[in-house]
Image (cartoon, helix red, strand yellow):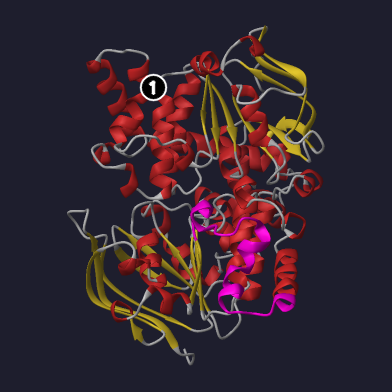
Amino acid sequence: MDQECIIEFSKFGFQYFSQKEPTLYDIDLKIHKGEKILIAGPSGCGKSTLGNCINGLIPFVYKGTMTGSLKVDGQETRKSSLFKMSMNVGTVLQDSDGQFIGLNVGEDIAFALENDCMPQEEMKKRVQTIASIVDMEDYLAQDPHELSGGQKQRVSLAGVMVDDVDILLFDEPLANLDPKTGKTAVELISRIAAEDRAVVIIEHRIEDVLHCAVDRIVLISEGRIVADDTPDRVLASGILTECGVREPLYLTAARYAGVPVTAEMRPASLNTFDTETCAPYIRRWFEDSYVRTHAEKKREMLKIENVSYSYDGVRQILKNVSVDVYEGEMISIVGKNGAGKTTLASLICGFMDPDEGRITLDGEDLSRYSIAERGEKIGIVMQNPNQMISKTMIFDEVSLGLKARGLPEEEIRKRVDEALQVCGLHEFRNWPNSALSFGQKKRVTIASILVPSPRILILDEPTAGQDYRHYSEIMEFLKKLNENGQTIILITHDMHLMLEYTDRAVVITGGEKLADMRSFELLCSQELTEKANLKETSLFALAEKCGINDPLGFVECFIHYDREVRSNEA
């Protein structure tokens, strides 16, 4: 590597003052100008802590003990300052709400330029240009806190792009984005990764990040670097799944088919993957494994009839939407950012009343019930955990609903312990919520809604920020609840989740229902995925590349085979 080394960890370690053990151990890592690095690993492994060391939040905001050396642009960070480091490092945080400063989107994007005393006319032009690139030019006057999760992420991205820094750090940049917007974001990050910049991406969604090439994958597990190599070598090794990180679906399908995957087969991208070698294995596996399934008929439970809603009385967020939800089913509601999915969930829960139409549960109009009465029947886990958490300690937060219902202390403890165990939080039960990562906070909110056992459970982006192991634990638990009769509605951008766990998907786009169909069929339709800002599954493309005449059947085959594998492992 001829380029200058701009980030250098040497025997580096860090331990928060609030914790008994270090979060990072013995980190040796060099990142050069012009490199694009993907840092991956399970939740709580130290990825975000590593990022916070690079941007100066450690040691200047989050206090603890540092060992070894960390130099950013040749300067030992402990001898620098947060202000100096911000001149070199631009950061897009995992939690966008924690990053907003301006009263509107335009002000927020312009913040760094204002600090640099850029002339106003030049500043306005630059803000308009950057806002256009991230498709937010029509929202410059809007309060950033009122935007959808994906729109917030784009504003954060614009705020970093507008300034000229040597290092760009992205912490879970795809967590709240729909698939197509995520793909655009990855392309955007690649475009702004000029040769004289270092780009560091911390992300769980490996397949989505690898849509555009990266130079190296740095894999962290339990605070240590366990792999630092080219994407082809890391993916071929199988170490991702060993560490609780999801590998690309096409690669999982190849392994199920018995393909001996090697780095020479270029598995980092389906465009480069040696499908010619894979094809005989894939075709044989499909012939041996495929069994057609038929959806069973269930009793109608929740009925949404011709619902329309507008926040301001002018622009309709939902237009004449009708959806039937059946008892005991698990259904996905998908679509582009800002399409109205979360608004629909809010109407179901009674947080707002529809302008037109009605919502019934078992034939009863829900408008008769108060929010508290609806809460007994319908539980919701919101997209942003910070909007739900009200207690200082984890155990108190999860037990809050049960205590309000007056359950015995012994029953409360038993149910809370079970929920925390499932959500991978039992060892943290006596921790304060403030000590958790964004993904861990998400699991706290899921646990708190699971314990009261509502008839319908709505989860808005339940797996955002989760590694594959915790994702699987939560979803397998929801699957068991579903098998025992629990009705579950998932609002998600995660197409893997939709494919693996829900047989049916409702597509909302532009406030209208675009489709209501089997999940795997949706992700095999180029027309529908394009309209809804989704993305065709790589399984469909793999089947076509391998010469399978029924690629739709191949995707269905994979889903059912994969469900069996995960059920056996659970």
Q: Is residue 127 magenta?
A: no
- Which span is picked out in magenta? 93-122
With respect to residue 229, does 304 lie above or below?
above
Q: Quadrant of residue 401?
A: top left
Q: Secondary structure at mark 1?
A: helix
Residue pictured at 70% horizontal, 62% vertical? 134
Residue 110 lies in the magenta stretch: yes
Horizontally, residue 358 falls left or right of residue 9, namely right
Q: Nearer the viewer, residue 479 or 378?
A: 378
Tell me if residue 418 comes above or below residue 540 in the rendering: above
* Residue at the (62%, 29%) spot, across then down: 346
For mark 1, what is the residue?
Answer: 401
> Farthest residue in the left direction?
20
* Rendered location of residue 435, percent (x, y): 31, 49
Judge from the rendering whether residue 137 lies leftward or rightward of residue 108; answer left or right.
right
| Corner quadrant of residue 452 | top left
Residue 305 image position (x, y, % from top left): 76, 18
Give the amino acid type for the residue marked by disc 1 in the picture.
Gly
In the image, farthest residue toward the bottom: 2
Could you say where residue 69 lies in the image, as x and y percent from the top left? 27, 79
Q: Is residue 337 left or right of residue 460?
A: right
User: 363 left or right of 97?
Assistant: right
Q: Is residue 12 above or below residue 546?
A: below
In which quadrant of the rendered image does the C terminus lie? top left
Mark 1 Cα shell of 10 Å, populated few (<14), some (14-19), many (≥20): some
